[in-house]
Amino acid sequence: MQQRLSDTLDWEDNFSQPPVKTTLHAIVKPQTFGEYIAYGISQIGSPPVWGLFALALVTTTLTFANAWPWLGLYLLLDVLTPLSFLVWQLRRGSITDLDIQLREQRRNTLLVTVSGFALTWLVMFIGGAPPALTLMAGAGMLQWIIIFGITMRWKVSIHSTSAAGVAVIILRIFGLSAVPLVISIPLIAWSRVKLRHHTPAQTIVGTLLGIIVSGLAVLLSQTY
């Protein structure tokens, strides 16, 4: 019987120790129909895809021409750069899968992601970018900093954090018309638990983190 991945992934390691050598055999793959459904939901709800989805929605609210350079900046630093770095790590064997299921392999990707969001938010804040984009960058920066801190000791669900954070931001921008998006939060959390990539507690903490941080960013942001 295959060992539960939550047991495999929650080793008592720390990043000061040599990396644990792992292979793809340590990664639980979908086998049943329900797990394949969960896998599809998990892929669609992954942070890069969900980030692109949120960016596309926000783009529909931007009406002035100088918004496009800011969109390009966000796309380059906060989506393409972390994703490219992720693929590069996979090709050189630093990580076992694009989902980075093994917690001890997440540090470098998180550092690149935090740096990208921090730089994006700083440039947007100083340069007077559209408030909606500045809000997204600021919320993302806070979320990834906290995720990095938690990941040093525990495996929180980044999928759940991303889903909840995007839902809060889109609700702030679009109002009640975006309420159906809320259903994505439990669906994505369920998929992570179903695939045994996370425990229920890890998805709950991730969801609360996304709601609290994005909610705080909304409160501190400019009115638009």
Image (cartoon, grey):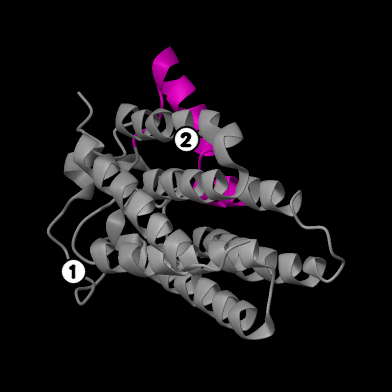
Q: Main secondary structure of the magenta part?
A: helix
At horizontal 22% and vertical 37% (from top left) the residue drawn is: 199
Say left or right for 86 vs 155.
right
Along the viewing direction, whichever of 140 and 31 lies nearer the viewer: 140
Most distant residue in the top direction: 33
Q: How many marks?
A: 2
Mark 2 vs mark 1: which is more N-terminal? 1
Residue 221: percent from left, percent from top: 51, 67
Would residue 31 be counted in the magenta stretch? yes
- Which residue is farthest right? 65
What span is colored magenta in the figure? 28-51
Asked whether, in this view, residue 184 is left or right of residue 127, the answer is: left
* Quarter containing the C terminus: bottom right
Kind of residue at disc 2: Ser
Q: Is residue 134 visible?
A: yes
- Front one among 22 and 78: 78
Closer-to-camera residue (165/86): 165
Q: SS at mark 1?
A: loop
For the point 28% across and 61% down, which residue is it?
104
Specify few, some or many for label 1: CA neighbours under 10 Å numbering under 14, 14-19, or 20 or more: some
Q: Label 1 amino acid?
A: Asn
Query: Is residue 189 placed above or below 52 in the rendered structure?
Result: above
Query: Does residue 93 show up?
Result: no
What residue is shown with label 1? 14
Residue that label 2 marks: 42
